[in-house]
């Protein structure tokens, strides 16, 4: 027995030694960013006023399929042209799919792989019941209390206008990029980008464009983002989950509610939805999420660093811990979210049909086809038809290259947003969708980052009530794009 205990003790000591050694090998955190001059000077008040003007165009995309206000989009097109005259006269503008915009800024050496900067012109609707909660009306474009207020100030007219501001400022200084730059601004990102961004990507690919860097919205910088990191952290989206909505249609004999049949459409549909919720997709700590944790290690307290530096052993513990919270669980598996139910026309009539819509955000390793097959197996009811709700479904994107010069340039430019801070810049998996997904089949250098320092509560304002951006934060975003464009010769 003593020999056995001694052996166990030796194993424990060896294991502890391995854990500590691996932890000590974690590289030191990146040094604090040095303060550097921006390539342009940003007039904060004037820039905020121009963003406010763009917010006043109600370029809304309706998920219900309701017609959009074409005049609002065309008005925004004209506003951009007149507000940024140097950009208008220097860059080549094309209209794609009727309402999306493609700009080409020819570089000094057109044989070099180009850069693609993305954004979108459309915004989500504002539910009427929420209108009384807005401090400033959603399309007022008010500039008050140090903020620009209105729909699109965070998602995503800020990106579009920041890029224009940066280019206008660079052109005023006589700057010309080392390589060609494409600006792609879709008009239907909020409903999948199937007509805008997808058409632009197809057009550029048909012209032989192979980007050295693609940057869209998606990541962000804010405080208290991840456990153990108390200061500000920036996350860059290196991949995004797939998207699928399945319509479940249960059929049964209709009739009078006083004589119910053994099987009702509502009951069958309820059992199907309950079965899906009771049998979630399996979790796995891999892919971009594992990379996020490994990249966090240099900035974490020592005990937490031991865990992150030894995921070969600690992954099950980390996975259980993450699974307790909706955000953590969503990073580990394909999510199942029933979102819509329809059945019946009267309280005493058995409906012959009942339908539900279930939305899935698909993790890497799964596909639209594999998710659909699994849903049918779990429901296991031949009288419940499972089919895609519409054509707005897409497999998970490929994971972009963290070792590329494109990722390094974006990371360095982000650190320049916070001079004097030892700012963690981490890769992560985008759980929503962006227009960058359409580049997935054509490049491994597609990244996602919203270049705005977010304040307390700002994440809830995206698609929410009182969307706004700090005037100073908007100026930071403009400087980010100016720095990025000035640095593309390093790609």
Image (tube, rainbow, N blue to C red):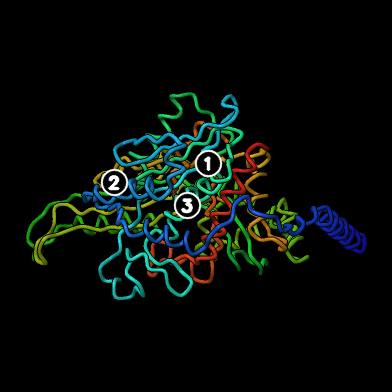
Nearer the observer, disc 1 or disc 2?
2
Say left or right for 471 vs 36: left
Q: Judging from the image, what secondary structure is the residue with disc 2 in?
A: helix
- Tell me how far mark 2 sits from mark 3, CA to CA: 19 Å
Nearer the observer, disc 3 or disc 1?
3
Instruction: Report the residue marked by disc 2.
Output: 74
- Tell me how far mark 3 sits from mark 1, CA to CA: 31 Å
Q: Is residue 197 above or below residue 209?
A: below
The residue lying at 30 percent from left, 48 percent from top is 73
Question: Mark 2, residues whose alpha carbon is within 10 Å: few (<14), some, or many (≥20)?
Answer: some
Instruction: Report the residue marked by disc 1.
Output: 365
Q: Quadrant of the C terminus?
A: top right
Residue 13 screen position, x and y as percent: 88, 60
Question: Mark 1, residues whose alpha carbon is within 10 Å: few (<14), some, or many (≥20)?
Answer: few
Instruction: Report the residue marked by disc 3.
Output: 159
Say left or right for 205 vs 76: right
In contact (CB < 8 Å): disc 1 and disc 2? no
- Along the line of sight, the residue nearer the viewer: 45 or 384: 45
């Amino acid at each position: 027995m003593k020999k056995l205990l001694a052996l166990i003790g030796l194993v424990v000591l060896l294991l502890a030694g391995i854990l500590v050694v691996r932890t000590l090998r974690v590289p030191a955190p990146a040094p604090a960013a040095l303060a550097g001059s921006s390539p342009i000077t940003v007039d904060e008040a004037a820039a905020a006023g121009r963003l406010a003007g763009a917010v006043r165009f109600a370029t809304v995309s309706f998920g219900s399929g309701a017609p959009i206000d074409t005049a609002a989009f065309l008005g925004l097109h004209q506003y951009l042209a007149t507000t940024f005259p140097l950009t208008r006269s220097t860059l080549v503008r094309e209209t794609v799919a009727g309402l999306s915009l493609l700009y080409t800024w020819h570089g000094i050496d057109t044989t070099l792989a180009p850069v693609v900067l993305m954004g979108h012109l459309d915004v989500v609707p504002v539910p009427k019941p929420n209108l009384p909660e807005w401090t400033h009306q959603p399309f007022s474009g008010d500039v008050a209390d140090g903020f620009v207020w209105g729909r699109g100030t965070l998602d995503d007219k800020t990106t579009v206008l920041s890029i224009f501001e940066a280019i206008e400022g660079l052109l005023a200084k006589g700057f010309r990029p080392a390589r060609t730059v494409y600006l792609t601004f879709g008009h239907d990102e909020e409903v999948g980008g199937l007509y805008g961004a997808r058409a632009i990507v197809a057009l550029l690919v048909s012209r032989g464009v192979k980007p050295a860097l693609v940057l869209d919205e998606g990541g962000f910088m804010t405080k208290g983002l991840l456990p153990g990191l108390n200061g500000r952290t920036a996350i860059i989206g290196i991949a995004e989950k797939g998207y699928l909505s399945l319509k479940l249609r249960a059929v049964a004999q209709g009739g009078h509610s006083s004589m119910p049949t053994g099987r009702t459409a509502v009951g069958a549909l309820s059992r199907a939805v309950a079965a899906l919720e009771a049998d979630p997709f399996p979790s796995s700590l891999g892919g971009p999420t594992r990379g996020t944790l490994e990249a966090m290690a240099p900035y974490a307290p020592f005990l937490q660093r031991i865990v992150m530096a030894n995921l070969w052993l600690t992954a099950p513990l980390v996975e259980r811990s993450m699974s307790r919270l909706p955000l953590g669980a969503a990073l580990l598996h394909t999510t199942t979210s029933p979102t819509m139910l329809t059945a019946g026309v009267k309280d005493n009539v058995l409906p012959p049909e009942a339908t539900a819509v279930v939305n899935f955000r698909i993790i890497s390793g799964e596909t639209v086809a594999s998710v659909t097959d699994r849903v049918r197996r779990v429901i296991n009811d031949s009288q419940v038809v499972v089919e895609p709700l519409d054509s707005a479904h897409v497999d998970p994107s490929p994971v972009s290259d963290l070792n590329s010069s494109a990722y390094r340039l974006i990371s360095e430019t982000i650190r320049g947003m916070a001079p004097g801070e030892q700012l963690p810049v981490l890769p992560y998996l985008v759980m929503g969708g962006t227009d960058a997904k359409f580049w997935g089949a054509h490049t491994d250098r597609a990244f996602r980052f919203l270049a705005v320092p977010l304040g307390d509560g700002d994440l809830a304002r995206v698609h929410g009530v009182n969307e706004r951006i700090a005037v100073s934060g908007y100026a930071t975003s403009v400087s980010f794009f100016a720095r990025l464009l000035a640095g593309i010769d390093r790609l």
